[in-house]
Image (spheres, helix red, strand yellow):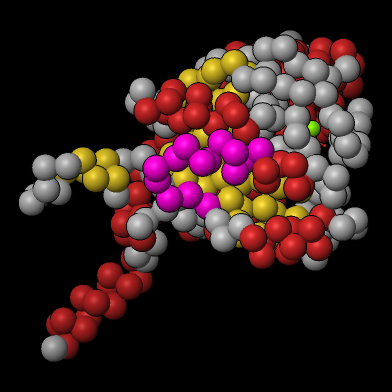
């Protein structure tokens, strides 16, 4: 039976939680009448997390696991889980028992209402104020700048149609922003309130250093969403103030020259015109380079519109999600097409 659901859990030094977590997941999945898998990703733990996973595997056939040689971070762990997952639906959650597996049916039910992504909302969040407050500000900024309004981007308990996340290029700490990134595909995003528990075992893997990282990630995210498919436009917008300065200084240079202002002033305006003009040329040149990079690289997020594309097969009455085929097609290179043409000519 093809797998319907993959539950992806990154784990980093969670030896005290992992067994209880699996028990909690299995308790919920008992009621499922479809095939599922549980994927634990050990993100280079230095404790006994992996040894415990190996033990648990002996009695739990649905359990699969990946081990990183070193700690790569929660985003890389999740991406490895997405790559490995075979289910049509993917659930992610934390492995420290702060998310509650009993919320999984709730997320599934919401997804069935016709959404592509459902994000958990820790309405009654059990973390310290110093964590909750900056996260509220970050949530507001992301919602406002990306247009995907969620109360709680940071909640790992989320559910995705697999085609919406498998093709995203997430790196750094971007796991928090997947709904905003995926919304570029036209994915429909919803949220539901979920339970949240205080951390009982182990320690949080993040400290205050997370705050500047999240804010720089928000900047990067907005750049990606707005300009990754048209970098020239981004650079052209950045060059506008310099263009205005060039115009202003060239007018001043003209007056300085015509009305014989002091030679110091004239020289200053002339040099200022040249410098701001050079800035415009440099920014536009960077934009052109950016276009070349995007055009020749395999940045799948620049082709996001294709990811959730649906098409109607000629002989099928069902809507069929064709993301894989579409992605494969987009990789056909022009040179291949030309080569094929030559072959057929020769033949
Ligand atoms: N995690 C991970 N790699 C890391 C940091 C965290 O796999 O480098 C996992 C961690 O084991 C947990 C989840 O990501 O399952 C969330 O981490 P944590 O609970 O420390 O974050 P918080 O709840 O404090 O935001
Ligand atoms: Mg936690």
> What residue is rendered at 54% in x and 18% in y?
192
> What residue is rendered at 83% in x and 20% in y?
127
Figure quadrant, ligand 1: top right
Q: Is residue 288 visible?
A: no
> Residue 255's x, y, as percent?
70, 13
Q: Quick check: is 29 in the magenta stretch?
A: yes
Q: Is residue 151 visible?
A: yes
Q: Quadrant of residue 170 in the image?
A: top right
Closer to us: 107 or 211? 107
Image position of 118 (left or right of 113): right
> Residue 184's x, y, as percent?
46, 32
Closer to us: 88 or 286? 88
Image position of 231 (left or right of 88): right
> Residue 54's x, y, as percent?
73, 64
Q: Quick check: is 13 in the magenta stretch?
A: no
Image position of 97 (left or right of 193): right
Q: Quadrant of residue 345 in the image?
A: bottom left
**248 up-or-down from 288: above or below:** above
Closer to us: 35 or 125? 35
> What residue is rendered at 43% in x and 25% in y?
109
> What residue is rendered at 91% in x and 31% in y?
207
Total labels drawn: 0
Give the magenta part as a residue range.
24-37
Where does the N terminus fall, quadrant-wise?
bottom left
Image position of 171 (left or right of 90): right
Where does the C terminus fall, quadrant-wise?
bottom left
Q: Quadrant of residue 133 in the image?
A: top right
Closer to us: 334 or 68? 68
């Amino acid at each position: 039976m093809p797998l319907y659901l993959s539950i992806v859990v990154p784990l980093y030094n969670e030896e005290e939680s992992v067994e209880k977590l699996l028990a909690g997941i299995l308790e919920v999945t008992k009621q499922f009448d479809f095939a599922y898998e549980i994927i634990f990703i050990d993100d280079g733990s230095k404790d006994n997390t992996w040894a415990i996973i190996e033990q648990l595997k002996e009695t739990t056939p649905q359990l699969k696991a990946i081990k990183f040689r070193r700690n790569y971070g929660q985003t890389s762990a999740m991406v490895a889980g997405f790559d490995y997952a075979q289910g049509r639906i993917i659930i992610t959650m934390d492995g420290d028992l702060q998310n509650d597996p009993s919320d999984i049916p709730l997320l599934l039910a919401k997804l069935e209402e016709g959404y592509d992504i459902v994000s958990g909302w820790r309405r009654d969040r059990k973390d310290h104020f110093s964590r909750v407050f900056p996260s509220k500000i970050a949530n507001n900024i992301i919602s406002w700048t990306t247009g995907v309004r969620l109360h709680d981007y940071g909640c790992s308990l989320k559910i995705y149609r697999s085609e919406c996340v498998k093709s995203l290029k997430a790196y750094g700490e971007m796991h928090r922003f997947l709904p905003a990134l995926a919304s570029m595909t036209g994915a429909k995003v919803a949220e539901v309130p979920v339970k949240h528990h205080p951390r009982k075992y182990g320690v949080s893997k993040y400290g205050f250093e997370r705050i500047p990282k999240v804010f720089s990630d928000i900047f990067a995210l907005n750049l990606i969403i707005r300009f990754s498919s048209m970098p020239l436009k981004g650079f052209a917008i950045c060059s506008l103030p310099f263009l205005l300065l060039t115009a202003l200084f060239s007018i001043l240079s003209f007056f300085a020259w015509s009305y014989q202002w002091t030679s110091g002033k004239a020289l200053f305006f002339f040099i200022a015109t040249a410098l701001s003009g050079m800035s415009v040329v440099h920014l536009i040149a960077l934009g052109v380079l950016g276009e070349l990079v995007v055009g020749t690289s395999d940045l799948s997020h620049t082709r996001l519109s294709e990811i959730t594309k649906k098409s109607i097969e000629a002989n099928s009455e069902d809507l069929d999600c064709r993301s894989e085929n579409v992605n494969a097609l987009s990789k056909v290179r022009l040179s291949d097409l030309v080569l094929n043409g030559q072959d057929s000519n020769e033949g």
